[in-house]
Every structure is written in C-alpha cells, then in structure tokens.
Amino acid sequence: MKLVQLSILSMAIGLLTFSCDNDDDTPQVVNEEEVITTLNVTLTPQTGTPVTLQSQDLDGDGPNAPVVTVSGPLTSDTTYNGVITVLNETVSPAENITEEVEEEAEEHQFFFSVGGGLEATTEYTNFDGDQNPLGTEFRIIAGSPSQGTLTFTLRHEPKKPNDGTLSDAGGETDIAVSFDVTVE
C-alpha cells in the first residue's frame, strides 16, 4: 500500500513540475513589414515649379510592373527641398507609411544614389533622435545639364551610424526605386 501511495505521490510531483514549467509561452510581438505600393518624391525649388517623382505598384509583387513617372526636368544650378512619402494604396483610404517610418526613425533610413552621369548632390535635412540621418526630408542640388538616375532606397534596421552607403548600412530594403532624371 505504501508503494502505491509513494508511486502516486511521485507521479503527482512530476506532473506538477512539468505543468508549472517556467517557459514563457507568450508569443513575441512581430513588427510586420508594411506594404508599400507608392513612393512619392516632391522636389521644390525656392522659385519655379516643383518636380514630382512617383513609383506606383498597386499589385505589389503581382505581374504588373510599377508605373514610374517624372513630372519634368530639374533646373541646373538649383537647390531643391525634397520630401518623400510612402503609401499603402491597397487599402482605402490609403495608409501613409511615412508616419510609421518617422515614428520608428531609429529603425529606418532613406539612402540616395546619384548615377549614370547625373550632375547632382544630396544631403539629409531630417534626423532620428540620435541625430543619425533619416531622409524623409532632404536637399538635392542640381548641377550642370546632365542625365542619369536618382535612386531612393528605404532600409529597415540599418546600422546607425553608417558611412551613407547601402553596403555599410546593412538592414533590409523596404523599397528601392530608380528614376531617370534630366538636369537642363
């Protein structure tokens, strides 16, 4: 009889030990990447007409290519203030993802790349809380007449500070778009 009682007691202790397991079964909150369908860049000179650049891909990874438009040329020897907005237009009304990028500034950075002979330079004008570049606001200085590409890349969780290059920044690309730009 004592053997049966001892066996039952051992089993009860074993069950209590495993049922009171200290594992934290609470799921970890996952910060889902947002859907970005549209990237808008507005370049506003001190005088003259603003230039808009847009990439819109309403079917996301679907079969249709993004529609990329540039409203006109940049004027040589002119400084433009730039503002970037990113949207999710798969929902109505469209969701402004820029707000989240700015709220999570330490986890995001836009990178600018000038290529193909385009005479232009860029500089950041807004920063995260640690004074590292964010890039939803920037300045572009159009140089002499030329043609080339202007590429905007949004990285999630880049290394900060970084040397301003994508290779040094790491992280994941949320969106990257190249625009064919002319300076006249």
Image: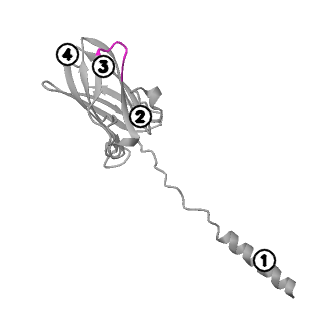
Q: Which badge, 3 or 1, comes first in the chain's sequence? A: 1
- Crowd band around label 4 with a 10 angstrom C-alpha radius: few (<14), some (14–19), many (20+): some
Tag shown at residue 54: none
Q: Nearer the viewer, residue 61 or 124?
A: 124
Nearer mark to the viewer, of 3 and 4: 4
Q: CA distance from mark 2 to mark 1?
A: 59 Å
From the top left corner, tell me how far across and down residue 66 is, in percent.
40, 31
From the top left corner, tell me how far across and down residue 127 is, in percent.
30, 37
Q: Secondary structure at mark 4?
A: loop
Q: Secondary structure at mark 2?
A: strand
Mark 4 belongs to which amino acid?
Answer: Asp
Residue at left 36%, top 33%? 110
Q: Which badge, 2 or 3, comes first in the chain's sequence? A: 2
Q: Which badge, 3 or 4, comes first in the chain's sequence? A: 4
Residue 177 within the segment the image draws in magenta? no
Residue, disc 4: 77
Residue at left 30%, top 19%? 181
Residue, disc 2: 175
